Amino acid sequence: MSVHLLAWGAASAFAANQSIASFELGRFFLGAGLIFLLATRLVPYALFALVIGALAATQYYLSTEWPLGICLILRAVNHTVSCWLLPIVGLWGLCGVWDASDFFAQEVGHVFNATFEFVALFVLPILANRVWPTSTQKDETSSSLWLQKTEGLLYMAAGFGGGLIEFYFLWVRDFSKMWADPTFMPPQGDFGHMFTALSWGFFGLYGFLSATQGQHTSFHVVGAAMFYGVIMSTHAVGTLGESGKDTDVWLLMHRVTAGLFVFGSLIRLVGKKIDAACTFFLAASYFTCAAKGICHAIASHFVMGHAAVVSLVPLAVAAMAIQVWLLNRLAERCIAETENKDMEVEACRCCRDEEIETSRLCNDKQETAEIVLL
């Protein structure tokens, strides 16, 4: 437990440094080496350290060459890996879920969905609001359409991709049994996963097509999140086949997640994008903790299930505040680097123009001198 806690603390400090400090290779490899040493017996930490080091090195070499959009995507990927996935890996270690028989189905499955929610519903609106301010009505329309297109693309990629993956697993695992035995019925929750993923994709398609036609709408977010919340409120009922405090906490976690998604969709409906994004972050955090292993580990520390659920509120809100601060600093750094790069390009252009003008004047003087001699 102490080794996990130490590695998690070092990893979080390193992640924060990568998001707000200067990107120097010495710091990258020093931080990666520190985590590697602390995680000698924890291979996932070492792998994440290598991934973060690679992302950071990529940013170091390319952030001064690529435009703002590409630079921002690189920083957002680095932020997601280091400030979202890495702490979750630490949480898995603290809760001791690595050896669980359903680790992939529960913990990893929840993290896939929660990471999509973190990126598409939280990181993207925060960065868009910070990087493209809406000082005029024209700017607001342009920024909203850009955000709408990007959200639509993300929803389509995650929704259709996730739906195809679910269909593949159903085909490999259950459809062959249905073909051999017509009375066999596969778990209905898997069909729910597939159709829910596809619904995100089709809502994203609607948002993207509307944006390409210049029509601003929030229905692709509102409809998808509200439908997801309603399905979430009924999805967990009776799927464990167990009873007791652990199952009660597991069900409560899913229902709190459902309520937060519905509430966030209503906030987005009235145009409060940042408030909605923060609500969706809380929902993604609760959904991560709704995985069976983490949920049971939290429930083991409380006599009453409701107390276990409420105990996450201050932690989730604190994490949300830190994430917003880090994302704002990340956006400010990208903007500053882009402005510096533009100034350097302008300075080089001015120097080149001066050299051309000086060369032209010298040629004119030489031609004049030759004419006088003649």
Image: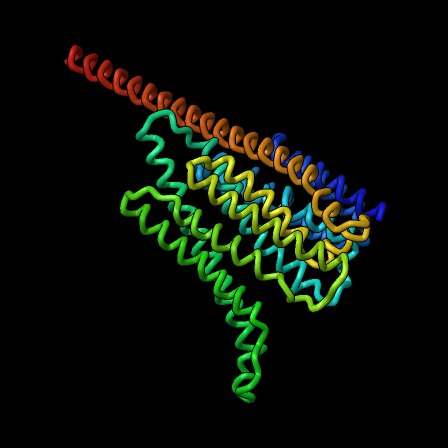
Report the number of numbered marks: 0
Q: Residue furthest right?
A: 2
Farthest residue in the bottom direction? 180
**Picture residue at 37% right of the left edge, 21% below the top:** 351
Q: Could you say which is closer to the camera, residue 72 or residue 145? A: 145
Quadrant (top left, top right, bottom left, bottom right) of the C terminus: top left
Percent position of residue 105, x then y: 65, 64
Is residue 272 visible to the viewer in this orientation of the structure?
yes
Report the residue at 68% width, 35% height from top.
27
Residue 71 visible within the image: no
Q: Nearer the viewer, residue 132 or 236?
A: 236
Quarter assignment of residue 134: top left
Q: Where residue 315 sits in the image (x, y, percent)?
A: 70, 39
Question: How has the structure been colored for display?
Answer: rainbow
Image coordinates of residue 125 in percent, x first then y, are: 48, 39
Image coordinates for residue 244, horizontal then vertical, percent: 76, 61
In the foreground, 373 or 93? 93
In this rendering, would 374 be left or right of 263?
A: left
Residue visible at 25% across and 19% down in the picture = 363
Q: Quadrant of residue 147?
A: top left
Residue 58 in the image: above or below residue 64: below
Say if 328 sits above or below 306 in the image.
above
Q: Residue at x 48, y 29 (%)?
A: 335
Farthest top residue?
A: 372
